[in-house]
Amino acid sequence: MTTQTTALTAVIYKDAGWFVAECPEIGTVSQGETLEKSVENLKEATELYLQETKLQPRGRAIITTFEAVVNA
């Protein structure tokens, strides 16, 4: 079996005291009490997922920001 690595994106936000990490290229999500732990857990979840599912290359995610009007 050949092993290879690929760079993926982690989008991280804080929710109810936890750091939630999502991988938009794969669709996996995980969390952790620290930013580092959330990424570590996301890596583990993604690797487990990819053991069962073939990686379907979709290209790198494009991350940007935008402003929206919020009625307060």
Image: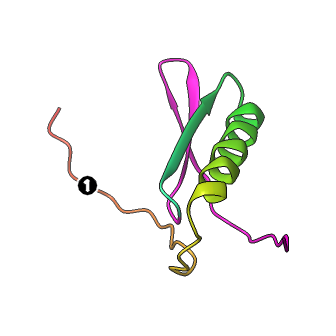
**Residue drawn 55% across the image and 80% down it:** 57
Left/right of residue 56 with respect to residue 7 in the rendered view: left
Q: Quadrant of residue 52?
A: bottom right
Percent across and percent down for residue 31 are: 59, 31
Residue 21 lies in the magenta stretch: yes
Mark 1: give few (<14), some (14-19) or many (20+) Cα within 10 Å: few
Boundaries of the magenta span: 1-25
Q: In the rendered image of this protein, does residue 15 appear above or below residue 23?
A: above
**Residue drawn 63% across the image and 62% down it:** 9
Quadrant housing the N terminus:
bottom right
Residue at numbered disc 1: 68
Q: Secondary structure at mark 1?
A: loop
Q: In the rendered image of this protein, does residue 14 appear above or below residue 33?
A: below
Number of numbered tags placed on the structure image: 1
Looking at the image, which residue sits at the far top?
Answer: 17
Kind of residue sitting beneath label 1:
Ala
